Image (cartoon, helix red, strand yellow):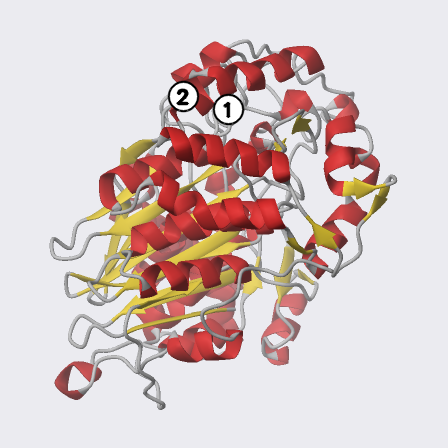
Amino acid sequence: MTPALPQPLFSRRAALRLAGRAALAGAFAAESCFATSEPLANDFGAIAGEPAAEQVGLRVLAAGGNAIDAAVSAALAASVASPHNCGPGGYGGCMVIAQAGTHKVTAIDFNTTAPAAWQPDTFPLDEKGGVRGQVNEYGWLSVGVPGTLAGLQLALDRFGSHSFAEAAAPAIKLAREGFPVTTGMAAATRGSLAWLRKDPATARLLLKDGQPLPAGASWRNPELADLLETLARRGSVESFYRGDIARRIADAFQKNGGLVRFADLAAYEAREVTPLIFDWRGFTVHTAPLTAGGLTVLQALSILKELDWPALPAGAAKTHAKLEALRMAWQDRLTLLGDPEHVTVPVPRLLSRDYSREAATRVRIAVKSRRPLAAKVQPRPQGGTVNLSVADRAGNLVALTLTHGEAFGARVTVEGLGLTLGHGLSRFDPGPGHPNSPGPRKRPLHNMCPTIVSRSGRPVLALGGAGGRRIPNSLFEVLTQIIVKGAPFDAALAAPRLHTEGDLTVRPEKAWPVGDMDYLKSVGYQVVAGNSAKIGAASFDPFTQACRAAWR
């Protein structure tokens, strides 16, 4: 018999219904960006994200846990139930947390770090600048120190009310008893098959007789259950980084030609950091700082603000202006950004009003001349990732994003631990001399950008995305709908999105107005229909304490 996921507290439809509530009645309703036409009650909180993780998070909230407890438990569950997207060996992520009562918003950075032994020739380049053998993408050389467990532990220690053992219990149950393979996991396994077969431990874990499991088949990871159970019994993830488990992980790297050593694991720490902040139209956006992707979102919003974008006439030219704002932000992202502890990144200048004014002037010229701005950047597909957005009835909000990178990350597994590792070093620009070039103990630039939005000083919305390089633009589109257009919660998520990485290719969703796309073609863009990142959002009404969550 195929083991099922843990019995949900509610059916998915009922859970989504309970996760919704009309926000802000009366006088405040006129200012609300979350009002809907169908009020629905919610007694404990709301969560949006990976389906199995949602169920775990709802259980934690219903049992009295706060949003941080729910986010950590849900993240650990997702790390088991969505092994192609994330895992306890995932390269890391980041989260933004709003604390009830104080209205303080903070961030936790748990991005990977490159090993101290990294050398300039670790990623050998071919004559075209590509990495020979894709060793920066797959295999043991693509792996830095896994940051996920350290980040979840830090969040729980500082802001949660549950122990690590309590938080890990649902994930342990999932790993021990198993669950049906999802269509996403089955597709990711098929797409990664050639690489998965190259690593014996990964092949034994994910394949049956060398073949991928079909959707609906039962899958278990008892070795990972043992690992998480050991950490739970010890009360923390300390030994994963500075104990016997760390030594087993380091030994696996050395045996398989990787560079991470015990000293790299022992030196690793997740850290609490200050979010980047942007104010506009009574809203404050708090997003994770570098090396996360939120700076790109804030840059594009800053340019719209200087353009007085809400006042521009509706139509294709207005879409062109928004596109150019995004392209300029991506140009800076792909040429100037890297780990600020290792390279100089002009963050204050990029977010300054003077810089935004200069950019807005260039955008106006481009729109008036009906020509794209010149740019030399190289798009690069990136996928994977899980985002969890959580709100509780006390007003705590969490946006948490974690990842392996591409499907199953590096596609290697630590023998005996069931620990598949993320390929964080793939997020570096492999060539020398770039701000995001790899280096010893350096953190790569990534696309995750969990965000909290405050209204009139009160945190009211947590949101983030899953979908690689599509995340910053999709988040930008939703924020534009809410902040600039005053769109209701559901309408903001439903509105069509487009994607650009700064070149002349534009990837709109199919629902984007045809006239706008015809215009962009006429001025020199290549328009190709595409998908957006999945944005999950959870809101809190500070007047009624109602919470709701949704994603698209």
Q: Residue at x 70, y 34 (%)?
A: 411
Q: Residues within 10 Å of mark 2 (few under 14, many from 20)?
A: some
| Relative height, residue 166 to residue 454 (above, below) | above
Q: Residue furthest bottom?
A: 37
- Front residue of 217/347: it is 217
Q: Quadrant of the N terminus?
A: bottom right
Give the labeled residue for mark 1. Answer: 145
- The total of numbered circles placed on residues is 2
| In this rendering, position of residue 375 left or right of residue 58 | right
Q: Between residues 114 and 51, which one lies in front from this camera angle?
A: 51
Assess disc 1: are there few (<14), some (14-19) or many (≥20) residues with their C-alpha within 10 Å of its C-alpha: many
Q: Check contact, mark 1 vs mark 2: CB within 8 A.
A: yes
Say if residue 171 shows up in the picture. Answer: yes
Name the residue tied to disc 2: 268
Reading the chain from its start, which is encountered first: label 1 or label 2? 1
Q: Amino acid at mark 1?
A: Val
The amino acid at mark 2 is Tyr
Residue sitting at x 32%, y 45%: 355
